[in-house]
Amino acid sequence: MFLDDFIRMCYDGFLQGWHERNGGNLSYRMTDEDVKVVESQFCKNSRHYDMPFSVPELAGSYFTVTGSGKYMRNVPLAPEKNIGIIRIDSKGSGYDILWGLEDGAKPTSEIPTHLMNHLERMKATDGACRVIYHAHPANITALTYTIEPDARTYSRILWQSETECAVVFPEGVGVVDWMVPGSIDIGVETAKLISSYRAVIWAFHGIFGSGNDFDETFGLIHTIEKAAEIYLKAKSAGIVRTITDDELRLLADAFGVQLNKDFI
Ligand code: 13P
Ligand code: ZN
């Protein structure tokens, strides 16, 4: 059941150390079948909230989302208090809370970035992408203090830091320089990049990742975080050699992926 997978991913991220306190959030765009499975649990008196932005293309869509200020660590203990199901209203400028987020809780403060990213990834994947995930992994965030916020630089460093990175994210990663979190502006800037990159790093903050399912999305962030860790370890020990461009090309040929031509 999608809710079990959603809850498991929240806790898996906590176990990785990516969700200190209320850090990070997760959203899942539900299928019609998912809705059928849970709709008998929807509350009769749903709460409606307006949003200070609109996503008309998502009108009527259902999302499972983590709550603002809620701890990923607590999600398996009390899902109904820490996560919820919302339906975007007919104008796309508000939502109804249909289940969960009990005691007056609201969806994550990063709802602008989540919904704008869903829209872009939905378009980019013909509707296949369903998961948007925000985490605060320490090595990715540390990396943002050591290099300029440039997608080519980040992508090359990450590809060179572990052989399979170029296979997992051949398009590279996007980067948004520091901005106020939870804002509409950071949502707009992230969404501009997420149509080309499945993962976008936020300088001095963390990362947003997307995928067709929970495993793929979690795996993408896990891979990027591990590569960042390897890079920082290698850099502090002293880098004397790395994977060459020719080797990256050989890898791409062997695995049948197309590396971002602007980066190699
Ligand atoms: P929320 O608790 O509102 O989800 O915010 C956490 C976070 O990581 C903000 O960037
Ligand atoms: Zn955050």
Image: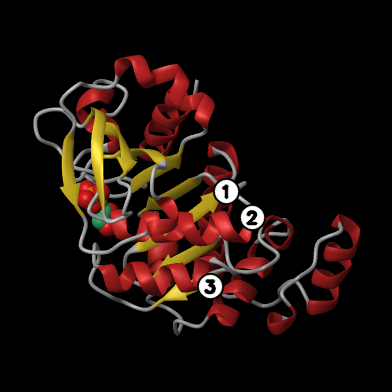
Q: Amino acid at mark 2?
A: Thr
- In the rendered view, does 211 fall on the left or right side of 99? right
Residue at (33, 48) in percent of width and height:
90
Q: Nearer the viewer, residue 52 or 15?
A: 52
Q: Amino acid at mark 3?
A: Lys
Q: Quadrant of residue 15?
A: top left
How far apart, in angstroms, are the residues tagged by discs 3 and 1? 35 Å
Q: Is residue 180 above or below residue 71?
A: below
Q: Quadrant of residue 185?
A: bottom left
Q: Tell me the crowding category of disc 1: few under 14, some 14 to 19, or many 20 or more residues within 10 angstroms, Cα based.
A: many
Label 3: which residue?
A: 235
How far apart, in angstroms, are the residues tagged by discs 2 and 1? 6 Å
Q: Amino acid at mark 1?
A: Cys
| Place of residue 162 in the rendered image (x, y in percent of width and height, measured from the top left) | 67, 59
SS at circle 1? loop
SS at circle 2? loop
